[in-house]
Image (tube, rainbow, N blue to C red):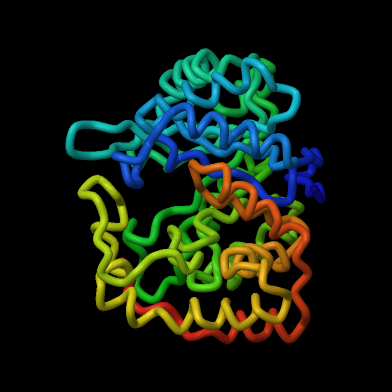
Amino acid sequence: MERRTIGATALAVGAVGLGCMPMNWAYSTSRQRGDESVRAVHRALDLGVSLLDTADMYGPFTNELLLGRVLKERRPDAFVSTKVGLLVGEQHIVANGRPGYVKRACDASLRRLQTDVIDLYQLHRADPEVPVEETWGAMADLVRAGKVRALGLCAVGARSGRRSGARLHDGTVRQLERVQQVFPVAAVEAELSVWSPEALRTLLPWCAARGVGFLAAMPLGNGYLTGTLTPGQGFEPEDLRARHPRFTAEMMAANQPIVAGLRRIAARHGDAVTPAQVALAWVLAQGRHVVPVPGTKQERWVTQNAGAADLRLTERDLAEASALPPAQGSWE
């Protein structure tokens, strides 16, 4: 697979990554099977999908434990990205950016992942009670201690409360400007897809101008852009899509023209090309510093997603994908 670099330190990864969250958390819990997910991770590594994206909160903790089963055997094949800063309670999620906690959490992640070093350690969310510079400084200490190779930041969420008139990623850019003064940012992770292109306005250019890698989260729109979901099909109560306004039956039906457009583009490249591969190829075309990280727990989808790295969209394809109707339904 084509390789791409993350950050000024030129950390090399496969052009398409693997989001591991669905293996243990947030999606269709009744269909989560550890052995199947382990096979999916092995398949990813076989195909050159080296970036494995997880977090200590996924599960919580069980996602890192699952990856540890694979890393114990195949650590040299993998680029490990995990996150810190969020704690999962019974009914809520809270941020914790205290320096002491960050260092203890890193040690715990290393044990669960069965590795001596984390390639990319990301701040999942800044703690409003702790200056972000203090949290970032503790993470930088982990780099100096040899426990972490590079640092990343996850974008502030869409529902996190923005200033009146502010664009979606203005808050993230402000955080990035602050932490960059403490220690270099190697990568930023944020949602980017044909139905959520907001990062193209400010966040992606900010990264490109500074040699910062961009990990495109949810590049398949939580599965919607694959064309495999049926409007009104329903989701399990624990599935995050059960509460997402874009996944009501009405909004899923209203957004069908987006999938139809991806199908039209795919058809021009042959019967074997899928809407999901077109969606991923569009993300890949947004810059050499961009690595889409689609999440899955099944080998067949890992294989399909990896194939997107070989799909070359034409200028007509890219223009058509960029001009698809805006998604209806949002958190805001």
Instruction: Name the residue nearer the viewer: 281 or 174.
Output: 281
- What is the x, y in percent for residue 324? 54, 84
**Which residue is pictured at 63% across the width and 54% down the height?**
305
Number of labelled discs? Answer: 0
Instruction: Name the residue nearer the viewer: 141 or 222.
Output: 222
299 displayed left or right of 45: left
Q: Is residue 189 above or below residue 231?
A: above
178 displayed left or right of 126: right
Residue 55 seen in render: yes
131 displayed left or right of 230: right
Residue 214 seen in render: no
294 displayed left or right of 10: left
Residue 73, located in which quarter of the rendered image?
top right
The quadrant of the image that shows the C terminus is: bottom left
- What is the x, y in percent for residue 237? 20, 49
**Which residue is pictured at 46% across the width and 71% down the height?**
167
Q: Is residue 15 above or below residue 32?
A: below
Q: Is residue 61 above or below residue 286?
A: above
**Which residue is pictured at 64% across the width and 46% down the height?**
17
- What is the x, y in percent for residue 64? 48, 26
**Which residue is pictured at 64% across the width and 49% down the height?**
303
Residue farthest front in this picture: 271
Instruction: Name the residue nearer the viewer: 118 or 316.
Output: 316
Residue 283, located in which quarter of the rendered image?
bottom right
- What is the x, y in percent for residue 52? 60, 37
